[in-house]
Image: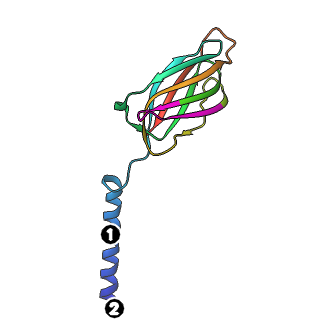
Amino acid sequence: MKAFASILCLLVAVNFATANQDLHTTGYPTPPRWEKLGERKVNFAVDRDEILVTAAEGRFTALKILVKKGGINLRKMVVHFGDGTEQEVETRDEIRAGGESRVINLEGARRVIRKVVFVYDTKNFADQKAEVELWGRH
């Protein structure tokens, strides 16, 4: 009985070590990563901008917006996918300088983005225009 228990413990230890090794080398995907897709400077009035994204940048599951130098009112976004479909996102978010939008999950599976169209206006009362960065999650 003692020999059986020893062998069982050895098998569990070997199985655990192999499973841990697989976590780092194969079997499980790496955590999602964020990639900067582009940026624009915002005019002081209502503005409409586009950021073009190429298929070489990959497929994405979510987007977010980072804002620098001045706040904005992000009214809406329209995401144009490589397959010709679109996803319109009504945001109505006020994003302060140094802030970011909520994570915007994209419908369906991971997809190639062709472009993202923004409609926003600035909340900046200084002489600097806000800078908007688009980030995508793989």
Residue 18 in percent (x, y) is at: 30, 64
Q: Nearer the viewer, residue 98 or 93?
A: 93
* Kind of residue indicated by mark 2: Met
The residue positioned 32% from the left and 58% from the top of the image is: 22
Q: Nearer the viewer, residue 125 or 136?
A: 136
The label number, if any, that marks residue 15 in the structure image: 1
- What sort of colour scheme is used for the picture? rainbow
Q: Residue furthest bottom?
A: 1
Q: Position of residue 67 (x, y in %)?
A: 58, 24
Q: Locate residue 39, reporting x and y percent.
A: 49, 21
Q: Which residues are magenta?
A: 79-91
Assign the magenta stretch its main secondary structure: strand
Mark 2 lies on a secondary structure that is loop
Q: Is residue 86 magenta?
A: yes
Q: Is residue 25 left or right of residue 119?
A: left
Q: Residue at x 60, y 25 (%)?
A: 98
Residue type at mark 1: give it.
Asn
Q: How many marks?
A: 2
Mark linked to residue 1: 2
Comparing 127 with 42, the one in front is 42
